[in-house]
Image (cartoon, rainbow, N blue to C red):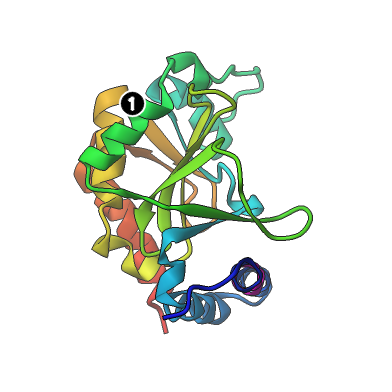
């Protein structure tokens, strides 16, 4: 099989980006169409994960000490006071340590990250952002140095997320660093205790069911 060149790769990302925007505008049927397009892409693209700007930190993974902050973020509590978030970079997690943890949970690192957002679609050339997962689902993290600054979950193929080890990766993060996932998408808008494997599974299953709807 001929390996796609950079132009083909960028074209693939552009198609997905346009499709995701269409899905946002036109609802669930379009979302399913985009998933199908992603799944039918060339095998060579399986090592590339799309980082869509609008997905950034929409399902953020943070310290459980941010529980009140998270509840305010999803509208579960009304607190007019300004709650300070404990930022992930304050936890002093190194990229090397987190990478090893995700690998131990049997998650593979994507070789390339395609960015779609402001400006032209592109393949990220810097090591600032890394992604681990499979089948167009990933746990992302970034940081200007070896210190992790943000962690978040993203998927462009929710129908197959249970065929990956994303659940194990999330649970490993929860157990080691006592973290929660805060999903502010309207579909769920909830907090997930990443130490609770059953709760993570229920969370993923909501997306699987939603994207399998006819």
Instruction: Tell me where residue 40 appears, x and y as whole percent.
Output: 44, 81
How many numbered circles are shown? 1
* Within-10-Å neighbours for mark 1: few <14, some 14–19, many 20+: few
Above or below, comparing residue 54 to residue 45 in the picture: above
What percent of the width, then of the height, locates residue 56? Answer: 59, 45
Give the extent of the magenta segment: 10-15
Question: Which residue is pictured at 79% across the width and 55% down the height?
Answer: 119
In-front residue for pair 113/141: 113
The quarter of the image holding the C terminus is: bottom left
Under circle 1, the secondary element is: helix
Q: Residue furthest front?
A: 2
Tell me which residue sits at (26%, 25%) in the image: 176
Q: Is residue 23 above or below residue 54?
A: below
Give percent across and percent down for residue 135: 37, 64
Which secondary structure is most common in the magenta stretch? helix
For residue 19, what is the image quadrant?
bottom right
Residue 103 position by quadrant? top left
Q: Which of the two residues, 187 or 114, is positioned nearer the viewer here?
A: 114
Task: Report x, y in % for residue 173.
Answer: 31, 33
Viewer-proximal residue among 211 and 54 = 54
Residue 152 among magenta residues: no
Q: Residue at x 42, y 28 (%)?
A: 95
Specify whether 91 is left or right of 55. Answer: left
Left or right, residue 83 beside residue 112: right
Which residue lies at the image location 45% right of the left edge and 77% below the top edge? Answer: 42
Residue under pointer 1: 97
Is residue 14 in the magenta section? Answer: yes
Q: In the figure, residue 75 lies in which quadrant?
A: top right
The N terminus, quarter of image: bottom left
């Amino acid at each position: 099989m001929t390996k796609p060149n950079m132009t083909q790769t960028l074209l693939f990302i552009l198609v997905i980006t346009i499709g995701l925007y269409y899905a946002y505008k036109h609802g669930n049927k379009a979302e399913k169409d985009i998933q199908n397009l992603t799944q039918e892409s060339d095998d060579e693209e399986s090592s590339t994960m799309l980082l869509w700007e609008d997905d950034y930190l929409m399902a953020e993974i943070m310290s459980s000490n941010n529980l009140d902050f998270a509840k305010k973020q999803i509208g579960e509590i009304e607190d007019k006071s300004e709650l300070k978030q404990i930022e992930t970079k304050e936890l002093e997690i190194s990229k090397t340590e987190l990478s090893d943890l995700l690998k131990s949970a049997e998650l593979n690192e994507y070789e390339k990250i395609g960015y779609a957002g402001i400006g032209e679609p592109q393949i990220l050339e810097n090591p600032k952002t890394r992604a681990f997962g499979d089948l167009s689902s990933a746990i992302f993290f970034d940081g200007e140095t070896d210190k992790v600054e943000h962690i978040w979950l993203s998927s462009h193929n929710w129908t197959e997320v249970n065929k990956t080890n994303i659940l194990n990766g999330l649970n490993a993060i929860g157990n080691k660093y006592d973290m929660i996932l805060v999903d502010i998408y309207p579909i769920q808008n909830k907090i997930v205790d990443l130490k609770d494997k059953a709760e993570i599974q229920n969370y993923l299953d909501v997306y699987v069911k939603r994207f399998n709807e006819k």
